[in-house]
Image (cartoon, rainbow, N blue to C red):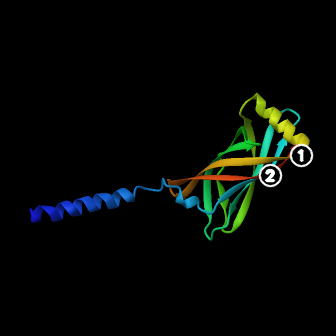
């Protein structure tokens, strides 16, 4: 019985070890990164753009392959902004972007118009990042940020 116990124990421990090394799906690469809204602008034709920035306080650079942001104003979802343009973020710097906002529904246009009349709004942004590590290897990161953002009409 003792001869069988040792190989069995080695087999179980090696399976557990390799199960812990299952790739980069845990999202730990995005630690420290943040996405902040810097402005929302509504054009005369009704289109809305969101100005945002990726902030990297870390000592390593990142290549973001894609971002998807859910934008909430005053606690209500107003739309999503998808950026599929790869973005490099140097170490300890930030990168500003402008992306078109796809409105969630008809009520979202009213929320943005009200916020533009006030000039500012409380926001929350929930961001999904696809971080390119090397080659085809990627990691996913989920970030949330909130604050106040200027809202204007063009």
- Relative placement, left or right, of 139 versus 43 is left
- Relative to 74, does residue 108 appear above or below in the rendering? above
For disc 1, the neighbor class at 10 Å (few under 14, some 14 to 19, many from 20) is some
Which residue sits at x=72%, y=48%? 124
Q: Earlier in the sequence, mark 1 or mark 2?
A: 1
Q: Which mark is residue 119?
A: 1
Which residue sits at x=48%, y=53%? 25
| Residue 139 locus on image (x, y percent) | 53, 54
Residue occupied by mark 2 = 148
Which residue sits at x=86%, y=32%? 45
- Relative to 148, does residue 58 appear above or below in the rendering? below
The number of numbered badges drawn on the structure is 2
Residue 153 showing in the rendered view: no
Which residue sits at x=72%, y=36%? 102
| Residue 127 locus on image (x, y percent) | 64, 49
- Relative placement, left or right, of 95 versus 129 is right
**Residue 115 position by quadrant:** top right
Quadrant showing the C terminus: top right
Q: Quick check: marks 1 and 2 in contact, CB under 8 Å?
A: no
Determine the residue located farthest toward the front in the rendered image: 75
């Amino acid at each position: 019985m003792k001869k069988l116990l040792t190989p069995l124990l080695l087999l179980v421990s090696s399976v557990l070890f390799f199960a812990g090394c299952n790739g980069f799906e845990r999202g730990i690469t995005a630690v420290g990164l943040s996405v902040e809204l810097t402005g929302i602008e509504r054009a005369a034709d009704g289109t809305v753009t969101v100005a945002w920035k990726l902030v990297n306080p870390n000592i390593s650079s990142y290549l973001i392959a894609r971002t998807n942001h859910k934008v909430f104003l005053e606690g209500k979802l107003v739309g999503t902004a998808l950026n599929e343009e790869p973005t490099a973020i140097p170490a300890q710097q930030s990168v500003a972007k402008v992306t078109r906002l796809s409105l969630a529904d008809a009520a979202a246009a009213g929320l943005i118009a009200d916020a533009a009349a006030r000039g500012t709004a409380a926001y929350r942004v929930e961001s999904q990042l696809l971080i390119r590590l090397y080659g085809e290897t990627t990691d996913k990161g989920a970030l949330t940020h909130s604050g106040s953002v200027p809202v204007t009409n063009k």
